[in-house]
Image (cartoon, grey):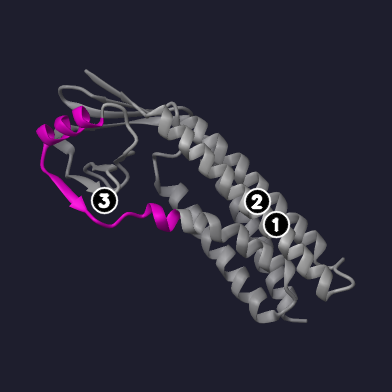
Amino acid sequence: MNHFKVNQEKIELIKRQVWIRMLLIIVLGIGIEMVIKYFHDDNLIIMPILATAIGVSILHFVKTKKQIKIFESFLLTISDTSIIRELKNAPAIEIAFKDINQIIRTNDGSFKIKGSTPNDIIFIPSYIENYGSMEKLLYKIGPITNNKYNPLPIMLGLVMLFPISLFIFASVLNKILIAISGFIIIFILILFIIKVQKNKNIDKGTRRSKYLAILFAIFILIITLSRISK
């Protein structure tokens, strides 16, 4: 059997990127708060919402750090008959060679192994140790399709857009901006819920958080309708 783990140097790089994003979010929050105080003498109405936005952003940061910690446990095993992905707090996924329908490589070097059912998917990050050896083994299993589409930049964009939309939603009094930012928040939450529901590559803790996302989406919807109806 051949075992492959994630490259710890790349994990440390990702951790630094998370810290940078969190710092940007904090700076944005301070900037918006200064704008609020400049244009509005009394902002007691929106302070609870702003506090919620800050709280959710911090929780998102903590959750992201936890996810990185879990992903450090990523273990890929390629045996003589199957590919197995193991991850802490997540069910192991095993796809037999005979059940592999497609092996896809994105332009960032990551791989997606598709099995016989839509839910049988193994994601292999590009920052894997002994990448060349793993790639050769995958070529022996079957043809590799190059896919230029990479969803990672979109996902990172949504990750940044979510707290920004929260701050806008909590800070502005304009009904159009409230409606737009509220819609974006709910839309991202719905995408998250759908992704968690379908993806087997997610740990149990994240899977349970979909219920919190549902409650938060309902909360944002109620606040949005209440604020734009005044």
The three-letter code of the residue at mark 2 reads Ser
Q: Which residue matches tag 2?
A: 57
Q: Is residue 79 left or right of residue 88?
A: left
Highlighted range, magenta:
131-155
Displayed quadrant of residue 39: bottom right
In front here: 80 or 198? 80
Q: Position of residue 48 (x, y in %)?
A: 80, 59
* Disc 3 to disc 1, C-alpha distance: 34 Å
Please count the marks in the image.
Answer: 3
Mark 3 Cα shell of 10 Å, populated few (<14), some (14-19), many (≥20): few
The three-letter code of the residue at mark 1 reads Ala
In the figure, 63 relative to 134: above or below?
below
Residue 170 magenta-drawn? no
In the figure, 39 relative to 13: above or below?
below
* Disc 1 to disc 2, C-alpha distance: 6 Å
* Closer to viewer: mark 3 or mark 2: 3
Residues at marks 3 and 2 touching, judged by CB atoms closer than 8 Å = no
Q: What kind of secondary structure does the magenta stretch mostly adopt?
A: helix
Q: Is residue 103 left or right of residue 64?
A: left
Residues at marks 1 and 2 touching, judged by CB atoms closer than 8 Å = yes
Please tell me whether mark 1 sits on a helix, a strand or a loop. Answer: helix
Q: Earlier in the sequence, mark 3 or mark 2?
A: 2
Q: Which residue matches tag 1?
A: 53
Please tell me whether mark 3 sits on a helix, a strand or a loop. Answer: loop
Q: Position of residue 226 (x, y in %)?
A: 74, 74
Mark 2 Cα shell of 10 Å, populated few (<14), some (14-19), many (≥20): many
Please tell me whether mark 2 sits on a helix, a strand or a loop. Answer: helix
Point 42% across, 30% down: residue: 9
* Closer to viewer: mark 3 or mark 1: 3
In the figure, 72 relative to 105: above or below?
above
Q: Which residue matches tag 3?
A: 107
